[in-house]
Protein backbone atom coordinates (compact mmCIF):
# COMPACT_ATOMS: atom_id res chain seq x y z
CA UNK A 1 0.00 0.00 0.00
CA UNK A 2 1.36 3.42 -0.96
CA UNK A 3 2.25 5.72 1.90
CA UNK A 4 -0.07 8.71 2.11
CA UNK A 5 1.68 12.08 1.78
CA UNK A 6 1.89 14.53 4.69
CA UNK A 7 -1.17 16.75 4.66
CA UNK A 8 -3.00 19.45 6.52
CA UNK A 9 -6.69 20.17 6.82
CA UNK A 10 -7.64 23.83 6.84
CA UNK A 11 -10.89 25.72 7.09
CA UNK A 12 -11.55 29.15 5.60
CA UNK A 13 -13.89 29.71 8.55
CA UNK A 14 -11.32 29.04 11.26
CA UNK A 15 -9.13 31.77 12.80
CA UNK A 16 -6.64 29.14 13.94
CA UNK A 17 -6.39 27.85 10.37
CA UNK A 18 -5.70 31.41 9.24
CA UNK A 19 -2.91 31.75 11.80
CA UNK A 20 -1.50 28.34 10.86
CA UNK A 21 -1.60 29.33 7.20
CA UNK A 22 0.42 32.45 7.93
CA UNK A 23 3.02 30.56 9.94
CA UNK A 24 3.24 27.67 7.50
CA UNK A 25 3.69 29.81 4.39
CA UNK A 26 5.93 32.45 5.96
CA UNK A 27 8.10 30.35 8.28
CA UNK A 28 8.05 26.90 6.65
CA UNK A 29 7.47 27.41 2.91
CA UNK A 30 9.43 24.23 2.14
CA UNK A 31 6.92 22.20 4.15
CA UNK A 32 3.97 24.13 2.69
CA UNK A 33 5.15 23.11 -0.77
CA UNK A 34 5.75 19.48 0.21
CA UNK A 35 2.35 18.66 1.73
CA UNK A 36 -1.21 18.23 0.51
CA UNK A 37 -3.73 20.95 1.30
CA UNK A 38 -7.20 19.63 2.10
CA UNK A 39 -10.32 21.65 2.99
CA UNK A 40 -12.54 20.98 5.99
CA UNK A 41 -15.87 22.67 6.59
CA UNK A 42 -19.24 22.23 8.23
CA UNK A 43 -21.65 21.24 5.44
CA UNK A 44 -24.93 22.94 4.65
CA UNK A 45 -28.23 21.06 4.48
CA UNK A 46 -27.72 19.95 0.88
CA UNK A 47 -24.28 18.51 1.60
CA UNK A 48 -25.50 16.99 4.85
CA UNK A 49 -28.09 15.04 2.90
CA UNK A 50 -25.51 13.84 0.39
CA UNK A 51 -23.16 12.83 3.21
CA UNK A 52 -25.92 10.88 4.91
CA UNK A 53 -26.74 9.09 1.66
CA UNK A 54 -23.05 8.16 1.35
CA UNK A 55 -22.87 6.92 4.94
CA UNK A 56 -20.38 9.60 5.95
CA UNK A 57 -20.50 11.04 9.45
CA UNK A 58 -18.33 13.99 10.40
CA UNK A 59 -17.37 14.25 14.10
CA UNK A 60 -18.37 17.90 14.35
CA UNK A 61 -19.88 19.24 17.58
CA UNK A 62 -21.46 22.67 17.74
CA UNK A 63 -19.41 25.16 19.75
CA UNK A 64 -20.69 26.28 23.15
CA UNK A 65 -21.09 29.96 23.98
CA UNK A 66 -18.34 29.67 26.58
CA UNK A 67 -15.88 28.20 24.09
CA UNK A 68 -16.77 30.86 21.55
CA UNK A 69 -15.99 33.63 24.04
CA UNK A 70 -12.72 31.95 24.94
CA UNK A 71 -11.69 31.70 21.29
CA UNK A 72 -12.43 35.41 20.80
CA UNK A 73 -9.88 36.19 23.51
CA UNK A 74 -7.37 33.53 22.52
CA UNK A 75 -7.25 34.45 18.83
CA UNK A 76 -6.87 38.13 19.67
CA UNK A 77 -3.88 37.28 21.89
CA UNK A 78 -2.36 35.05 19.21
CA UNK A 79 -2.74 37.71 16.53
CA UNK A 80 -1.14 40.38 18.72
CA UNK A 81 1.76 38.08 19.58
CA UNK A 82 2.41 37.62 15.86
CA UNK A 83 2.04 41.29 15.01
CA UNK A 84 -1.06 40.66 12.90
CA UNK A 85 -4.01 42.98 12.49
CA UNK A 86 -7.31 41.18 12.41
CA UNK A 87 -10.98 42.04 12.22
CA UNK A 88 -13.49 39.62 13.70
CA UNK A 89 -16.11 38.99 10.98
CA UNK A 90 -19.83 38.90 11.62
CA UNK A 91 -21.47 35.87 10.02
CA UNK A 92 -25.14 36.68 9.56
CA UNK A 93 -26.07 33.56 7.56
CA UNK A 94 -22.98 31.36 7.30
CA UNK A 95 -22.81 28.79 4.52
CA UNK A 96 -19.32 27.35 4.35
CA UNK A 97 -20.02 25.35 1.19
CA UNK A 98 -20.02 28.62 -0.77
CA UNK A 99 -16.35 29.38 -0.12
CA UNK A 100 -14.97 25.85 0.21
CA UNK A 101 -16.55 24.58 -3.00
CA UNK A 102 -15.27 27.72 -4.71
CA UNK A 103 -11.82 26.68 -3.49
CA UNK A 104 -12.13 23.45 -5.48
CA UNK A 105 -12.81 25.51 -8.61
CA UNK A 106 -9.78 27.71 -7.93
CA UNK A 107 -7.64 24.63 -7.24
CA UNK A 108 -8.65 23.20 -10.63
CA UNK A 109 -7.32 26.38 -12.20
CA UNK A 110 -4.01 26.03 -10.36
CA UNK A 111 -4.79 28.95 -8.04
CA UNK A 112 -5.90 27.16 -4.90
CA UNK A 113 -3.35 28.71 -2.57
CA UNK A 114 -3.88 32.16 -4.07
CA UNK A 115 -7.59 31.72 -3.44
CA UNK A 116 -6.98 30.68 0.17
CA UNK A 117 -4.79 33.73 0.71
CA UNK A 118 -7.42 36.05 -0.77
CA UNK A 119 -10.25 34.53 1.27
CA UNK A 120 -8.27 34.68 4.52
CA UNK A 121 -7.43 38.32 3.87
CA UNK A 122 -11.06 39.09 3.12
CA UNK A 123 -12.37 37.33 6.22
CA UNK A 124 -9.74 37.89 8.88
CA UNK A 125 -8.14 41.16 7.85
CA UNK A 126 -11.13 42.98 6.35
CA UNK A 127 -14.11 41.34 8.08
CA UNK A 128 -15.85 40.49 4.78
CA UNK A 129 -18.57 37.83 4.72
CA UNK A 130 -17.17 34.86 2.75
CA UNK A 131 -20.58 33.18 2.65
CA UNK A 132 -21.69 35.83 0.18
CA UNK A 133 -21.47 34.71 -3.42
CA UNK A 134 -20.59 38.27 -4.38
CA UNK A 135 -17.44 37.90 -2.27
CA UNK A 136 -16.43 34.82 -4.25
CA UNK A 137 -17.07 36.69 -7.50
CA UNK A 138 -14.93 39.61 -6.33
CA UNK A 139 -12.09 37.24 -5.44
CA UNK A 140 -12.47 35.65 -8.86
CA UNK A 141 -12.01 39.08 -10.47
CA UNK A 142 -8.98 39.72 -8.24
CA UNK A 143 -7.31 36.46 -9.24
CA UNK A 144 -8.27 36.54 -12.89
CA UNK A 145 -10.57 33.53 -12.49
CA UNK A 146 -14.13 33.10 -13.74
CA UNK A 147 -16.17 35.01 -11.13
CA UNK A 148 -19.38 33.20 -12.04
CA UNK A 149 -17.76 29.78 -11.60
CA UNK A 150 -16.52 30.69 -8.13
CA UNK A 151 -19.76 32.37 -7.07
CA UNK A 152 -21.86 29.47 -8.35
CA UNK A 153 -19.70 26.57 -7.21
CA UNK A 154 -22.26 25.51 -4.61
CA UNK A 155 -24.90 25.24 -7.36
CA UNK A 156 -22.81 22.94 -9.54
CA UNK A 157 -23.77 19.27 -8.95
CA UNK A 158 -20.35 18.05 -10.06
CA UNK A 159 -18.53 20.37 -7.65
CA UNK A 160 -20.96 19.30 -4.92
CA UNK A 161 -20.02 15.66 -5.51
CA UNK A 162 -16.35 16.54 -5.32
CA UNK A 163 -17.02 18.36 -2.09
CA UNK A 164 -18.53 15.19 -0.68
CA UNK A 165 -15.38 13.27 -1.64
CA UNK A 166 -13.28 15.93 0.08
CA UNK A 167 -15.35 15.48 3.23
CA UNK A 168 -15.06 11.71 2.89
CA UNK A 169 -11.30 12.19 3.27
CA UNK A 170 -11.99 14.15 6.47
CA UNK A 171 -13.97 11.19 7.77
CA UNK A 172 -11.35 8.62 6.78
CA UNK A 173 -8.53 10.56 8.40
CA UNK A 174 -10.48 11.01 11.64
CA UNK A 175 -10.24 14.80 11.51
CA UNK A 176 -12.25 16.41 14.32
CA UNK A 177 -11.06 20.01 14.21
CA UNK A 178 -8.77 22.44 12.42
CA UNK A 179 -6.01 23.05 11.74
CA UNK A 180 -5.20 19.35 11.60
CA UNK A 181 -1.88 17.95 10.39
CA UNK A 182 -1.01 14.35 9.52
CA UNK A 183 2.37 12.81 8.79
CA UNK A 184 2.35 9.06 8.29
CA UNK A 185 0.76 7.69 11.51
CA UNK A 186 1.19 10.87 13.54
CA UNK A 187 -1.59 13.40 13.93
CA UNK A 188 -1.21 16.97 15.19
CA UNK A 189 -4.24 19.07 16.10
CA UNK A 190 -4.09 22.80 16.61
CA UNK A 191 -1.90 25.79 15.90
CA UNK A 192 0.46 24.94 18.75
CA UNK A 193 1.19 21.55 17.15
CA UNK A 194 2.30 23.03 13.84
CA UNK A 195 5.96 23.22 14.87
CA UNK A 196 5.98 19.51 15.69
CA UNK A 197 4.43 18.67 12.33
CA UNK A 198 6.97 20.83 10.49
CA UNK A 199 9.86 19.19 12.33
CA UNK A 200 8.45 15.75 11.58
CA UNK A 201 8.10 16.42 7.85
CA UNK A 202 11.55 17.99 7.65
CA UNK A 203 13.12 15.09 9.57
CA UNK A 204 11.59 12.57 7.19
CA UNK A 205 12.69 14.61 4.16
CA UNK A 206 16.28 14.80 5.41
CA UNK A 207 16.29 11.06 6.14
CA UNK A 208 15.13 10.19 2.63
CA UNK A 209 17.79 12.45 1.13
CA UNK A 210 20.66 11.31 3.36
CA UNK A 211 19.81 7.62 3.81
CA UNK A 212 21.90 5.19 1.71
CA UNK A 213 19.97 3.44 -1.02
CA UNK A 214 20.46 0.04 0.66
CA UNK A 215 18.74 1.28 3.83
CA UNK A 216 15.69 2.87 2.22
CA UNK A 217 13.45 0.05 3.34
CA UNK A 218 14.07 0.77 7.03
CA UNK A 219 11.54 3.11 8.59
CA UNK A 220 13.38 5.91 10.44
CA UNK A 221 12.19 7.08 13.84
CA UNK A 222 10.55 10.49 13.80
CA UNK A 223 12.17 13.13 15.93
CA UNK A 224 9.00 14.69 17.28
CA UNK A 225 6.31 12.64 19.03
CA UNK A 226 2.67 13.14 18.21
CA UNK A 227 -0.25 13.38 20.57
CA UNK A 228 -2.41 16.02 22.18
CA UNK A 229 -2.78 16.67 25.89
CA UNK A 230 -5.51 19.25 25.44
CA UNK A 231 -6.64 22.30 23.53
CA UNK A 232 -3.84 23.56 21.29
CA UNK A 233 -5.23 26.38 19.24
CA UNK A 234 -7.75 24.46 17.21
CA UNK A 235 -11.40 24.76 16.29
CA UNK A 236 -13.59 21.75 16.86
Image (cartoon, rainbow, N blue to C red):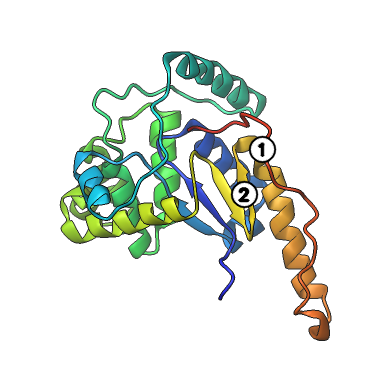
Residue 68 is left or right of residue 205, and the answer is left
69 or 127, nearer to the observer: 69
Residue 230 is left or right of residue 125, and the answer is right
* Residue 169 circle label: none
Question: Helix, strand or loop at disc 2?
Answer: strand
Please give the name of the residue rendered at 82% of the width and 86% of the height, measured from the top-left corner.
Answer: 214
Question: Helix, strand or loop at disc 1?
Answer: loop
Q: Quadrant of residue 183?
A: bottom right
153 or 137, nearer to the observer: 153
Quarter occupied by the N terminus: bottom right
* Residue 228 circle label: 1
Vertical comparison of 123 with 180: above or below: above
Residue 175 is left or right of residue 99, and the answer is right
Please give the name of the residue rendered at 40% of the width and 28% of the height, measured from the top-left corner.
Answer: 126
Dots 2, 1 in contact, CB < 8 A: yes
Residue 212 is left or right of residue 182, and the answer is right
Q: Which residue corresponds to mark 2?
A: 187
Residue 52 on image: x %, y %: 25, 48
Q: How many other residues sit within 10 Å of disc 1, few (<14), some (14-19) or many (≥20)? A: few
Q: How many other residues sit within 10 Å of disc 2, few (<14), some (14-19) or many (≥20)? A: many
Residue 20 on image: x %, y %: 57, 40
Residue at far bottom of view: 214
Residue 186 on image: x %, y %: 65, 53
Amino acid sequence: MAVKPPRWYFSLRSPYSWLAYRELTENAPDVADAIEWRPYWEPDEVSEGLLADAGIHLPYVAMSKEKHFYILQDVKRAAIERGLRMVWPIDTAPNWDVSHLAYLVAEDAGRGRDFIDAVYRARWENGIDISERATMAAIGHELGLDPDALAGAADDPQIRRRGIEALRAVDRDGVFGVPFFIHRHDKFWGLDRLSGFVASVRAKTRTVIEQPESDRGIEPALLVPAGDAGHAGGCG
